[in-house]
Image (tube, rainbow, N blue to C red):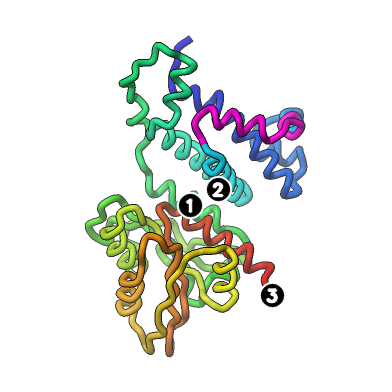
Amino acid sequence: MLDTPLSLITEVLLPNIRALEAKRLRSLGMSQSKIASTLGVTQPAVKQYLDIQDKFYFEKLHDLGLTDEEVNNILDMLTDVLLSGDIRNAMDFFTSVSLSYLSKLRFCLFHRKLNPKIPQDCSICENLYREDEEEEINVALSMIQNEIVSPLIPEVLSNIAYTRKNPKSLEDIIAVAGRITKIRNIPTPASKPMWGASKHLGNILLYISRKYPEIRSVMNIKYDEKVKKCMDELKMRYAIIGPHDYASDEVIETAVTMVFRPCLDAVVHLGGKGVEPNTYVFGKKPVDVVKKVLNIAAKYSIIS
C-alpha cells in the first residue's frame, strides 16, 4: 500500500479529533443523532466515541506530535465553526489546520516510527500547504455569526481584517466591505470580504504587521465596563488610551499603533466627544482573534 503523509490526517488526526469533538458537542447538550449529522458519521459511531475515555484519544494525538493545548485549540475553534452551521467552512478549517501541521513537519517523528524507510532528510510535506487568506477570514466570519457576539457590536459596527505577509499597501489587507452589522440579532457581514475594504483597520494593521510581522489580524468590538471586566477575568492583556476629543480615524489609528506591543491581546480607545469607545482585538490569524472575541462574548453574557 502506498504510504503518504496524508494518511496521517485521514487515519490518525481526523478520527481522534472527530471523537473528541463528539464529546464536546455532547457536553453542550447536543443529541447523539444531531452530533452524527453534524460530524457526518452514524449514530452508533457517536455512541462508540462517547463510551471511550478522552484519555485514549488524547494519547493517540500525543503520539502524532500534538500537545494538549494544540488539541484543545483545534477543538475550540472547530466547535465554534460547527455551531455556526456552516459545514463547508468547518471542512475548510480542518483541512487548513491539518495541512498546516503537515507543512510544519510536525508529524515526521510519528511517520518514521510507522515507516523507518522514510529518509531522514524527507521534507515532502513542506509544500502541501499554501495560505489562503480569503478562506481563513471566511472561517472566522462564520464563527462570529453567533447571537452571543451581538452585544459586542458597536454603534459604528465591527469589522475584521487580515493581512498578507509583508503587506505593501491597503490592497494587501482583506476585510468585510460594509462592515459587520446585526440582522435578527446575529452578527452578519454586510458583504463578502474584499481586499482593501477597510481603511481604518487596514491602516492599523498595515503599521503593526510591518513592525511585528506575526500580528496579522484585528477586529474591533465595543468597549464598556463589562468588556473591561470580561477581559480582566479572562486575564487578557490590554492597553487603554484616550479619550481624544473629536478624534479623527487618523488620530485613533496613530494612538493604537503607538501603544501596541506583541504581548497585548487588545488595545482600548476610550473615544471622546462624538467618538465611540472601541476595543481592538489582535492576533496572528482571524480565527485567533475571533476566539478571543467569543471568550469575551461568553463572559459578557453572564456578567451583570
Residue nearest the observer in this picture, 260 or 298? 260
Residue 153 vs 24, above or below: the answer is below
Q: Residues within 10 Å of mark 1 (few under 14, many from 20)?
A: many
Gap between marks 3 and 2 measured at Cα: 27 Å
Q: Residues within 10 Å of mark 3 (few under 14, many from 20)?
A: few
Residue 111 vs 205, above or below: the answer is above
Residue nearest the observer in this picture, 73 or 235? 235
Farthest residue, direction top: 1
Mark 3 or 1, nearer chain start: 1
Q: Which residue is mark 3?
A: 304
Residue at 42% of width from left, 57% of height from top? 283
Residue nearest the observer in this picture, 262 or 164? 262
Residue at 42% of width from left, 70% of height from top? 267
Percent coordinates x, y for residue 14 in the rendering: 56, 31
Residue 77 bears which disc, if any?
2
Q: Is residue 260 magenta?
A: no
Gap between marks 1 and 2 measured at Cα: 7 Å
Residue at 34% of width from left, 24% of height from top? 124
Percent coordinates x, y for residue 211 in the rendering: 27, 60
Say if mark 3 contacts mark 1, CB within 8 Å: no
Percent coordinates x, y for residue 263 in the rendering: 40, 61
Which amino acid is tagged 3? Ser
Describe residue 57's horizontal placement relative to residue 160 as left or right.
Answer: right
Q: Which residue is mark 1?
A: 287
The range drawn in magenta is: 48-66
Q: Is residue 50 magenta?
A: yes
* Secondary-structure class at tag 3: loop
